[in-house]
Amino acid sequence: MSNWSGMCTLVSQATSTDERGVIVTEEACRTVPCNAFSLGASAYYAAIAAGTHPSAVLQMRSASYRGERICIWQGARLRVERVDRSSPDFVRLTLGEEVGDRGGH
């Protein structure tokens, strides 16, 4: 697969303790090419039952994904809910938001 339909930003987090003993979380962002896929009905309802709101399924090269648990896709900050590594060359991430994460009502 050589044509990528979009770009997403993977966010890694590292925690450390500052000089006063306060835990500080630092984030590092990387933008990688990806393809978006539709979420199947069974996966959608299973995610709803688990308390998440599934938003997207993204595929990228396996070498691009380093275990990040946050992904920014189309302006939304989403959690990586599921990682599918069934192919040696590609990885598929199911992204979702926790119920209640939205700012508006």
Image (spheres, rainbow, N blue to C red):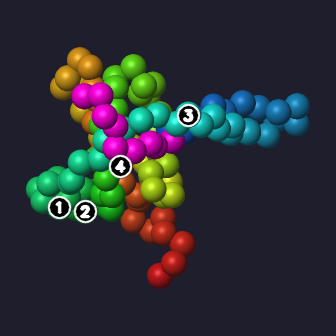
Where residue 46 sits: x, y (%)?
18, 56
Q: Nearer the viewer, mark 1 or mark 4?
A: 4
Q: Which label was assigned to residue 48? A: 2
Amino acid at circle 4: Leu
Q: Is residue 90 left or right of residue 104?
A: left
What residue is shown with label 3?
Answer: 30
Q: Cα distance, mark 1 to mark 4?
A: 14 Å
Q: What is the C-alpha distance between the residues marked 1 and 2?
A: 5 Å
How many residues crowd mark 1 within 10 Å: few (<14), some (14–19), many (20+)? some
Mark before the other along the chain sequence, 1 or 4? 1
Tag 1–tag 2 contact (CB < 8 Å): yes
Q: Which residue is mark 4?
A: 95
Q: Secondary structure at mark 2?
A: helix
* Amino acid type at image mark 1: Tyr
Label 1: which secondary element: helix
First of labels 3, 1 by sequence position: 3
Q: Measured along the vertical axis of the image, is residue 96 above or below residue 25?
A: below
Task: Tell which residue pokes out farthest to the front in this image.
Answer: 3
Element class at badge 4: strand
User: Which residue is depicted at the point 41% across and 27% down?
Assistant: 65
- Name the image quarter holding residue 100: bottom left
Q: Which mark is residue 45?
A: 1
* 67 with respect to 1 (left or right): right
Quadrant in the rendering for residue 74: bottom left
